[in-house]
Image: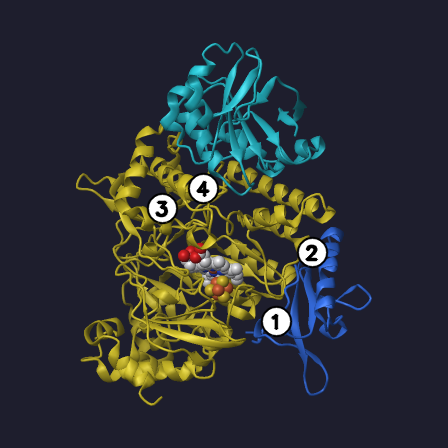
Amino acid sequence: MAKKLKGDQVLTGQLLREGDVVFLTEGGNWSLDLQDAKIATTPEKVEEFDLFIAQAEEANLVIDVYPFVVERDDTGKLIPSHIREKMRTTGPSIVYAEL
Amino acid sequence: MYVYDDFDEKFVRERAAQFRDQVERRLSGKLSEAHFRPLRLMNGVYLQLHAYMLRVAVPYGTLSSPQLRQLAMIATKYDKGYGHFTTRQNIQFNWPKLKDLPDILDDLADVGMHAIQTSGNCIRNVTSDQWAGVAADEVTDPRPYAELMRQWSSLHPEFSYLPRKFKIAITGAESDRAAIAFHDIGIQVLKNDAGEIGFAVYVGGGLGRTPMVGKKIRDFISLDDLLPYLVAILRAYNLEGRRDNKYKARIKILVHETGIDGFKAKVEKIFDGLEKDKLRAPAGEIERIQGFFDLPNYETVEPNPETLTKARSENAAFDSWVKRNVATHKQAGYAIANISLKPIAGIPGDATDEQMNLVADLAEKYSFGEIRVTHEQNLVLAHVKEKELFELWQALVPAGLATANIGAITDMITCPGLDYCALATARSIPIAQKISEKFADQKRQEDIGDLKVKISGCINACGHHHAGHIGILGLDKKGEEYYQITLGGSGDENAAVGEILGPGFSGDDVAGAIDTLVNRYVELRNETTETFLEVVKRVGLEPFKEALYANN
Amino acid sequence: MPIIKDGAIIVDSWTMLDEEADVPSSADIIIPLNVMLEKADRLSNHSGRIGLLIGNDVAVEDHADLIAKADIVVLELPAFTDGRAYSQARGLREDLGFEKELRVKGDVLVDQAAYLLRCGFDSFDFDGEFDAETWKKSSGIMTTGYQRTYKDELETRG
Ligand code: HEM
Ligand code: SF4
């Protein structure tokens, strides 16, 4: 069930086959880019995410689906409000794989 | 080292086929995520922050060169060219895809490896002393018993749906390099007056949100009774461990709530009622396994050869490396060479495919083709001739594998933290990197001496912070990372849980705080030989608190 | 809720008895252990067979006498992740020597069938749907096992 968090929200999950992080788009698809995300600006809209969570589970495409709070930076880009979702959206903050 | 026979091979191949079937049913929708999750976990597959993660078992930390090369191959083919060695002597791949995992398991089976029970509420990979078989202070090599337990615990029909995860560690030495006191069951191999092998058994240790030091449940259990006794402990736990609250489900809570005497009484009652014959190792099995752990064919070589002395006197960097990274071997003329995976400002425990391939080659050239993984996230070549140490070191240097810091302050245990981990509350790796940079100076590290800093990115304590001389725990305060510092923990034979010093620090300030604490220690110690823990014991936490917080 | 035995749905004569329900004295009934403990005398002239349903929190060795007389024992799997019945089953089979039918009832997954069989169960009383094809394929993949147990059809070492 979608929790009523403070602020605008987007819906995220991970692709069942690949594991990649994805975001629900306006068109009801899943995108790898947060900037494509459908934004819920009212509690009612957040409530509607429940439907997509159920659908995602049913369709067997995306797992571990939940909403999180976003804001916009100076340039108007969507950014997650919480450090965890920031990390999840942008990837590891360290230089890996090229020691 | 242990080599699979036809039976072991058939078993892991079938297990891989079983997982392939489970993945197929998941992808086709026949298996729901709720039902699949515990099944994938029992095969080491997590869903992490950015991707799936696969944890491959390195039983009791021993690898052959072909096995390490295969891990490198997997890193190249299915991942992003690197792997992460963990405190439980496993290796984790951070980017595999679910659809590729069945193939990866087949590739592992090709070299006698698997990911069985590297996660889930079952008996996990049995860990041991990384110097097993070569440590000068050991009663006997614990690995044959570890292998026996690995087999016994694999797909155990009774103990695969325990209340919570279950970790077993075994050591054969007085100095505990396997942290047995912090395991669900800790085992120390002993010899009685008659020269017979037996085991002291500890139960109920663990870290996580309620750290506890294990308590002794048996002084000496015979080899014959070892597996039946483990069955009795696990049955008591499986039946009575708490299933109502995930945070209270570990055996440490059961032991704590019933008291060690009460728990022991339950175990002994079950043990007495067991039909033991079937539960013992099959006849001849221990001897069969032991045959694989015979010492390699050491040559008779001159101890402390002149070439070594000369190279050390001519090359200060090599000399530092020998001092810090080379340990005494029980065979004269041989040495234990530790390879640090903690380059200054690097990612603790990570190794690239190229590094893995190089170490595999070097192991073949210098150390009977055998590699050890340590619980401190480093690698070991356990049987190197002293006269070949210099050559080995020269080969390690260009690969960034010759950092001379084993046991020093920059040799930190660090969990993946919020850079990878879905449960994390804060990052760990960047903190380790900043501390590492701060203490990069070799002279200063050597002056400080042995000092264990351990970092976890959340209360689950995968980075053993409770057991660090200095422990760092990353937390989340209103969406921002901050770090709590503990002092005085220890993971060895004098196991202790560290105490919290005071208010936490922001990510930018942690390295400075550690610097302050270490300077205080250096001021306070009587002689350079007085260790950090000895000083903490002598003066208490106050002087450290004062140093940290006096100005605020 | 089908009963599965040897990989197929079977129909048998057992009736699960709720607290007070009246059943003909000739019926084959399964009675919860606590009911049995209280009302054993009332069953003295029951002519049908009697089985026991034993909860997860029961120490089976404390009821060895009753169990020895039972014609079937049913253990529960309230959630597929709850493994207590596995230990109870081994206690019954290997330590108490119970040899009649042992059944598990509840949230059984096909992936657990092999483990349950090895712990000594003979039959499954299923919460979910039964898919014979999947059952046959998936439950039989492992033909090897390291542990020797009561009823072991797997290949073991030694
Ligand atoms: C990255 C994914 C990981 C996840 C999701 C994870 C999860 C957990 C959890 C939930 C606990 C607490 C268990 C409890 O207290 O009941 C724990 C403990 C522990 N984990 Fe991890 N862990 C991860 C990675 C690691 C790594 C990389 C290591 C080794 C460096 C590790 C080693 C340990 C150890 C040693 C403990 C504490 C010992 C104990 O009490 O069991 N884990 N882990
Ligand atoms: S301590 Fe926490 S953050 Fe670190 S790996 Fe374990 S669960 Fe993840």
Left or right of B134 in this view: C27: right
Kindly identify which numbered label has been placed on residue B153: 4
Q: In the rendered image, what is the letter of the chain coloured blue?
A: A
Foreground mark, 1 or 3, reads 1
Foreground mark, 3 or 4, reads 4
Tell me whether circle 4 and circle 1 mark residues in contact (CB < 8 Å).
no
Task: Using the rendered image, report if marks 1 and 3 lie on a common chain.
Answer: no
According to the picture, the residue beneath numbered tag 1 turns out to be A85
Left or right of A10 in this view: C41: left
* Chain identity of mark 3: B
Residue nearest the observer in this picture, B321 or A78: A78
Q: Which residue is drawn at 59% across and 29% down?
A: C124
* Chain identity of mark 4: B
According to the picture, the residue beneath numbered tag 3 turns out to be B294
* Residue B46: quadrant of the picture: bottom right
How far across and how far down the image is residue B202, in percent?
A: 30, 48
Q: Distance between the residues labelled 3 and 4?
A: 24 Å
Q: Can residue B401 be seen in this view?
A: no
The answer to whether the residue bearing label 4 lies less than 8 angstroms from the nearest atom of ligand 1 is no
- Above or below: residue B49 compared with residue C67: below
Query: Label 1 is placed on what type of residue?
Result: Glu
According to the picture, the residue beneath numbered tag 2 turns out to be A16
Among the two numbered marks 3 and 4 on one chain, the one whose residue lies closer to the N terminus: 4
Q: In the rendered image, what is the letter of the chain coloured yellow?
A: B
* Residue B191: quadrant of the picture: top left
Quarter of the picture holding the C terminus of chain C: top left
Circle 3 sits in a helix, a strand or a loop, which is it?
A: loop
Q: How far apart are marks 4 and 1 (CA)?
A: 38 Å
Circle 1 sits in a helix, a strand or a loop, which is it?
A: helix
Circle 2 sits in a helix, a strand or a loop, which is it?
A: loop
